Image (spheres, grey):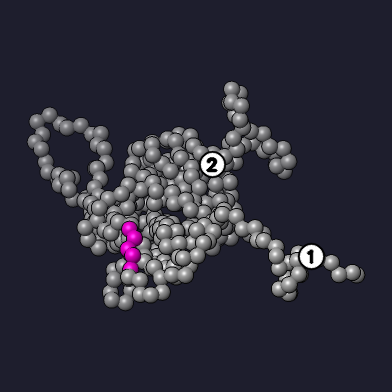
């Protein structure tokens, strides 16, 4: 075969290949999910201590019996209107991401670019994902700092359906508000039973939000579809006035209110033993919030000769004002083949 000039011979510095220009665009793509629905939907409050507390109370059961004529008022256990009060709490947790860029990297021209400002911005995005993953954890419990272990907050997964001795049974997760999916499918009746269980606790038919992982979201979208047994034919129920058939459910209309359905961040969703992606939280944003002791911010450190550096951090906790106002879908057992 005769010798000829080509582009693929990179073993030598001479020849036509040595003069070929590179084609590196200024486009920089980060291939990672960034949404933080639990963090973003929570009300933000100011914390003033490393242990944040709130009180919960309840009403006595309704009475339907009458009062006999002439009978004086009698005082009993229900006369103390504050006997049912309880105090719940959570420890703050500190989050931090550091960043640095060498002096040479700061000086050269790069795609992106790759300067100290971009490193700082990327750390903030990573920090938000750290917080979302911690809030979404399945079973992380609160822990005080003891000089060895750091403060840790109790996650949403532990507040909902967890074995928390500090939470009185009257304020625990409602019966039926936790569904363990063991057959690799979540059906509409299970969702409705969760919504009804929460409604019995709060009496509120608004503001519910379902943060659903990938497989769970697919099942919920199927609630709006009708298919035959082998799923070879699929029809969609839709308004005849609409010009678009939408196969994803953003709002689910139940007997006890409308539920907003949002995608969970798959990188932050809790890891569980069962079917992958079959996890979710049914929450009422009115009954949980984020308490910030140290708001998220960035601190630059002195340049000691190698380049610019710094860190972003914050300290916060999760306040679940009534665990009975929320539910969750788990998958603890893999389906049988």
* In front: label 2 or label 1: 1
Mark 2 or mark 1: whose residue is earlier in sequence: 1
Image location of residue 295, percent across then percent down = 30, 56
Q: Nearer the viewer, residue 285 or 294?
A: 294
Q: Residue furthest bottom?
A: 148
- Whether residues under marks 2 and 1 lie with C-beta atoms below 8 angstroms apart, the answer is no
Please report the residue visible at 54 percent of the width from the left and 59 percent of the height from the top. Answer: 111
The quarter of the displayed image where residue 312 is located: bottom left
Image quadrant where one finds the C terminus: bottom right
Image location of residue 277, percent across then percent down = 55, 55
Q: Nearer the viewer, residue 24 or 138?
A: 24
Q: Residue furthest top?
A: 241
Q: Main secondary structure of the magenta part?
A: strand
Is residue 100 placed above or below 111 in the rendered structure? below
Is 2 placed left or right of 195 in the picture? right
Question: Which range of residues does the magenta coloring cover?
Answer: 297-301
Is 15 in the magenta? Answer: no
The quarter of the displayed image where residue 7 is located: bottom right
Q: Secondary structure at mark 1?
A: loop
The answer for how far apart the CA atoms under marks 2 and 1 are is 62 Å
Image quadrant where one finds the N terminus: bottom right
Image location of residue 184, percent across then percent down = 59, 53
Is 134 placed left or right of 295 in the picture? right
The quarter of the displayed image where residue 292 is located: bottom left
Please report the residue visible at 41 percent of the width from the left and 70 percent of the height from the top. Answer: 307
Is 299 in the magenta? Answer: yes
Is 210 placed left or right of 73 in the picture? right
Find disc 1 in the rendering and name its residue. Answer: 6
Q: Is residue 93 visible?
A: no
Find disc 2 in the rendering and name its residue. Answer: 188
Q: Residues within 10 Å of mark 1 (few under 14, many from 20)?
A: few
Q: Secondary structure at mark 2?
A: helix
């Amino acid at each position: 075969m005769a010798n000829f000039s080509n582009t693929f011979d990179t073993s030598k510095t001479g020849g036509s290949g040595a003069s070929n220009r590179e084609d590196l665009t200024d486009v920089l793509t980060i291939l990672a999910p960034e949404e933080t629905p639990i963090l973003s939907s929570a009300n933000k409050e100011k914390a003033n201590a490393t242990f944040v507390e709130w009180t919960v109370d309840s009403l006595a059961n309704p009475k339907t019996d009458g009062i006999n004529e002439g009978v004086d008022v009698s005082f009993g256990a229900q006369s103390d209107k504050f006997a049912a009060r309880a105090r719940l709490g959570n420890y703050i947790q500190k989050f931090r991401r550091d960043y640095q860029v060498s002096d040479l990297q700061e000086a050269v021209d790069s795609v992106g670019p790759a300067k100290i400002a971009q490193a700082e911005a990327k750390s903030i995005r990573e920090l938000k994902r750290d917080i979302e993953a911690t809030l979404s954890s399945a079973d992380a419990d609160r822990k005080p700092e003891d000089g060895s272990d750091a403060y840790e907050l109790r996650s949403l997964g532990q507040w909902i359906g967890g074995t928390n001795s500090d939470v009185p049974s009257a304020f625990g997760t409602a019966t039926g508000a936790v569904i363990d999916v063991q057959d690799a499918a979540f059906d509409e009746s299970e969702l409705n039973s969760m919504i009804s269980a929460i409604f019995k606790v709060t009496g509120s038919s608004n503001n519910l939000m379902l943060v659903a992982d990938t497989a769970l979201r697919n099942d919920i979208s199927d609630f709006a579809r009708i298919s035959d047994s082998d799923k070879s034919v699929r029809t969609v129920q839709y308004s005849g006035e609409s010009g678009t058939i939408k196969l994803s459910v953003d709002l689910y209309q139940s007997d006890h209110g409308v539920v907003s359905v949002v995608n969970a961040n798959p990188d932050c969703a809790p890891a569980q033993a069962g079917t992958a992606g079959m996890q979710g939280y049914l929450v009422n944003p009115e009954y949980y919030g984020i308490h910030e002791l140290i708001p998220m911010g960035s601190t630059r450190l002195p340049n000691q000769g190698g380049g610019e550096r710094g860190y972003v951090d914050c300290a916060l906790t999760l306040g679940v004002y009534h665990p009975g106002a929320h539910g969750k879908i788990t998958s603890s057992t893999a389906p049988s083949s």
